[in-house]
Amino acid sequence: MFVEKLFLKSYRNLKDLELNLSNGVNIFYGNNAQGKTNLLEAIYIASTGRSHRTHYDKDIIDFTAPSAHIKAIVREENVIDKIDIHIKRDSKKGIAINGLPIKKLSELFGHLNVVIFSPEDLSLIKSGPSERRKFIDIQLCQIDNVYCYNLVQYYKVLKQRNNFLKKISIQNSLKENIFIWDEQLIQFAKKIIDKRTDFINSINKISKDIHKKITNGKEDLELIYKPSVFSDNIQEKIEKNIEKDILYKTTSYGPHKDDFLFFINDTNAKDFGSQGQQRTASLSTKLAQIKIIEEQKNSSPVLLLDDVLSELDNDRQKFLIENIKNMQVIITCTGVEDVVKNLKKECKIFKVENGCIFENF
């Protein structure tokens, strides 16, 4: 799978452009604040429908324009998908696949699978549980449409239950009807918890092996799933905490409270790992993510590397490069010479300057 062409219009600071990309390595170089990361963000949005940098769609629209447009031509062997995303300042964004509008964002997943690795990925380990839940959900939604459906339904029911809890706090007699939401919540929650358990077990096994190789056997990486509640006792937890939920007007237990932790040599990497250890653990996890997509989808995802090679020492750079063969890679950097030298393979090179992108011949 690879992005064959990318069209952007009124997208952040990037001038309207049409890019023909290689199915191998593509390098976009230039000084900071020229638009390199914006390009990767656009590809990420073409994959997931959401930015990894902002919660507000309007942030990506050029200040002088009413809307932005992203179009990606994605090829997988003889199959071509055209992803068309129209982001409007004052209304909901529109998404079409092969000219047909989609009704649900979940319908976009799987048409373009991506893995992104950036300096901010340290937040996967250092930040709060929401970032780690987002990592799990994006990964699973790319490879499992059923999980994506269950996740969307769970959050829909969760919102409805929380709204009903607010009504109960005003009119307590309504409490006897809370079971209507509890039954649905528990049904979807169990499926999500079971799938997340399987996913963490899989990615833990793969990332553990990768991490040992990167550290020459000196470090043992362990990913541990910390669900808010287990699938076999969620009903009991929900029922026992109804008064607490009414008091705080929110649902205390469920997948929306889940987390998973990184341990290096039996020590919590978030609290006690060095920045180097955290970065290596993140790299191991991202490489494991690629392998899982390859196994599940029988094709490689597109790898987006946002100025990360300069953040890695020579050994980690070499390991990363050795593990990204036979897939499309889109790299941003400030200095192109060192990247080309380390890759030791043919690359398509673009210069990014003041929002303009020029192909180097």
Image (spheres, helix red, strand yellow):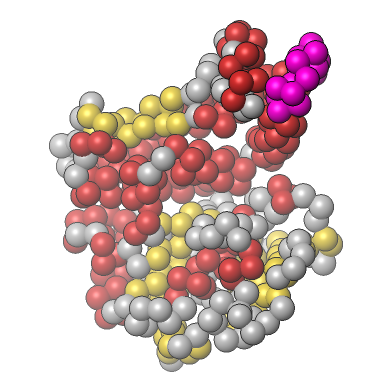
Q: Residue at x 37, y 82 (%)?
A: 30
- Judging depth in this view, the residue of 294 and 9 nearest the camera is 9
> As drawn, which residue projects farthest toward the front?
170
> Is residue 195 shown in magenta?
no
Q: In the depicted view, which residue is nearer to us: 60 or 112?
A: 60
- Residue at 45 percent of width and 88 percent of height: 354
Image quarter where the C terminus lies is bottom left
Q: Position of residue 295 (x, y in %)?
A: 52, 41
Q: Is residue 73 above or below residue 349?
A: above
What x and y, as percent, mark residue 113?
58, 54
Vertical order, 286 against 235 (above or below): below
For the N terminus, the image quarter is bottom right
Q: Main secondary structure of the magenta part?
A: helix
Q: Position of residue 104 (x, y in %)?
A: 77, 49
Residue 266: image quadrant is: top left
What residue is shown at x 53% (from left), y 16% (from top)? Answer: 230
Q: Is residue 86 left or right of residue 76?
A: right
Residue 5, position as x, y percentages in the image: 62, 75
Does the stretch in magenta take in 173?
A: yes
In the image, the segment drawn in magenta is: 165-180
Could you tell me which residue is drawn at 46 percent across and 62 percent down?
Answer: 304
Query: Which corner quadrant of the image does residue 125 belong to?
Result: top left
Residue 296 relative to residue 282: left or right: right
In this rendering, is residue 107 above or below 26? above
Res 17 visible: yes
